Structures are given as structure tokens and as C-alpha cells.
């Protein structure tokens, strides 16, 4: 499943910033053709690709969840109103927070069996934590590897390199909180 809305938002912002396709391709280590496919909704980027593109374009990655305006209600988000992104490799995020302007935001992440964020790990400002709703999660934070299952929770400084994997045979669902 691809997200043409994501691709359109990337293309629109890239053009407004005067960034060439080649610059995006160089930043994420992929071909110009692949970046073009993302922008046309024919391919899904990885989580890391979206983060790197956001950094290159000078926005927080949450920008790509926001097509036009904040949630209608301002205090809540109904399941059918959630904004979502699907990434390459069997990972999808749904934005659970009604406002993007607060001090934190929440995501519902689904990982297909074997799906992983990356092997290198990412780091950024802030703090994050989560609660495993169902399935299994292998989470690396720095040199530590946590084996989590349904009902487990975690928290760490986002500046510590981290990455994760669904080692199980079924979908893993996690609620993440980012500050």
C-alpha cells in the first residue's frame, strides 16, 4: 500500500524549498527514480527515509502527517479520522494526537512480522516511550537490547541511538509517545 498524499506533500515542500530530486536522493542514499516514485505515490519510503527527507527540507517529520489542518475536534481523534503513513518494509504509523502543536505526540505503530526500523539506529531530540499492545518487540537503545511483549512499556532519551524489530510471527502494535 502506498501513500500518494505523503508523496505529494514531499514533492510540494521540496519544490517550495528549491531542492532538487538529486539532493533528496543523495540525502537518503537512494536513486532519483526511487524518490520520484515516492513523490508519485508508487513506492513507500522507509521510516528513516521520511526522517532524512524532513531534515533536508527543514521540517519535523510530523509535518508529513498534517495534510492541511489540525484535527476537527482539537481534543480527540476518532479512529476514522486518524492520519496515517505507510512505510516500506511493513511498518505503518497512525497519528493518535489531535494537535501537532503540543509538547508531545502519540503514534500507533504496526509492524508486520520481521519488520524493522533500521539496523543503524536513529537519534533525535526529546524523549520517547511506549506500550506494547500486542505482539513482540525487540528494542535496541544504545548497547542494550530489550525483549518486550504485550503489556510491557518502556521509556528512554531519544538522543540515544535506537532501533527496533518485530521478531514474532504476528503483527506487533505499539503506542509510542514522543516529546
Image (cartoon, rainbow, N blue to C red):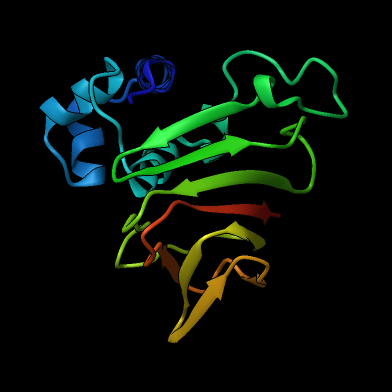
Above or below: residue 90 compared with residue 178: above
Q: Name the spot of residue 66 as percent of width and height, x first.
A: 60, 23
Number of marks drawn: 0
Q: In terms of depth relative to the viewer, which is nearer, 160 or 137?
A: 137
User: Could you tell whether 120 is left or right of 157 in the image?
Assistant: left
Q: In terms of depth relative to the viewer, which is nearer, 117 or 19?
A: 117
- Residue at x 58% of width, y 35% of height: 94
- Residue at x 24% of width, y 27% of height: 43
Res. 20 image quadrant? top left
Q: In terms of depth relative to the viewer, which is nearer, 74 or 145?
A: 145
Above or below: residue 168 compared with residue 98: below
Above or below: residue 101 compared with residue 17: below
Res. 44 image quadrant? top left
User: Could you tell whether 71 is left or right of 150 in the image?
Assistant: right
- Residue at x 41% of width, y 33% of height: 86
Can residue 114 be seen by looking at this rendering? yes
Q: Name the spot of residue 2 as percent of width and height, x first.
A: 33, 24
Amino acid at each position: 500500500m502506498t501513500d500518494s498524499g505523503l508523496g505529494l506533500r514531499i514533492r510540494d515542500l521540496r519544490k517550495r524549498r528549491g531542492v532538487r530530486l538529486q539532493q533528496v536522493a543523495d540525502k537518503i542514499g537512494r536513486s532519483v527514480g526511487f524518490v520520484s516514485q515516492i513523490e508519485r505515490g508508487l513506492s513507500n519510503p522507509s521510516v528513516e527515509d521520511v526522517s532524512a527527507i524532513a531534515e533536508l527540507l527543514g521540517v519535523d517529520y510530523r509535518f508529513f502527517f498534517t495534510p492541511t489542518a489540525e484535527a476537527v475536534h482539537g481534543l480527540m481523534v476518532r479512529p476514522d479520522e486518524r492520519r496515517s503513513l505507510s512505510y516500506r518494509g511493513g511498518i505503518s504509523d497512525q497519528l493518535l494526537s489531535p494537535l501537532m502543536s503540543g509538547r508531545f505526540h502519540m503514534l500507533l505503530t504496526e509492524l508486520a512480522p520481521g519488520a524493522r526500523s533500521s539496523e543503524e539506529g536513529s537519534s533525535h531530540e526529546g524523549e520517547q516511550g511506549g506500550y506494547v499492545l500486542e505482539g513482540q518487540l525487540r528494542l535496541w537503545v544504545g548497547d542494550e537490547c530489550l525483549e518486550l511483549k504485550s503489556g510491557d512499556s518502556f521509556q528512554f532519551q531519544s538522543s540515544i541511538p535506537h532501533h527496533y524489530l518485530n521478531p514474532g510471527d504476528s503483527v506487533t502494535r505499539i503506542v509510542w509517545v514522543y516529546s
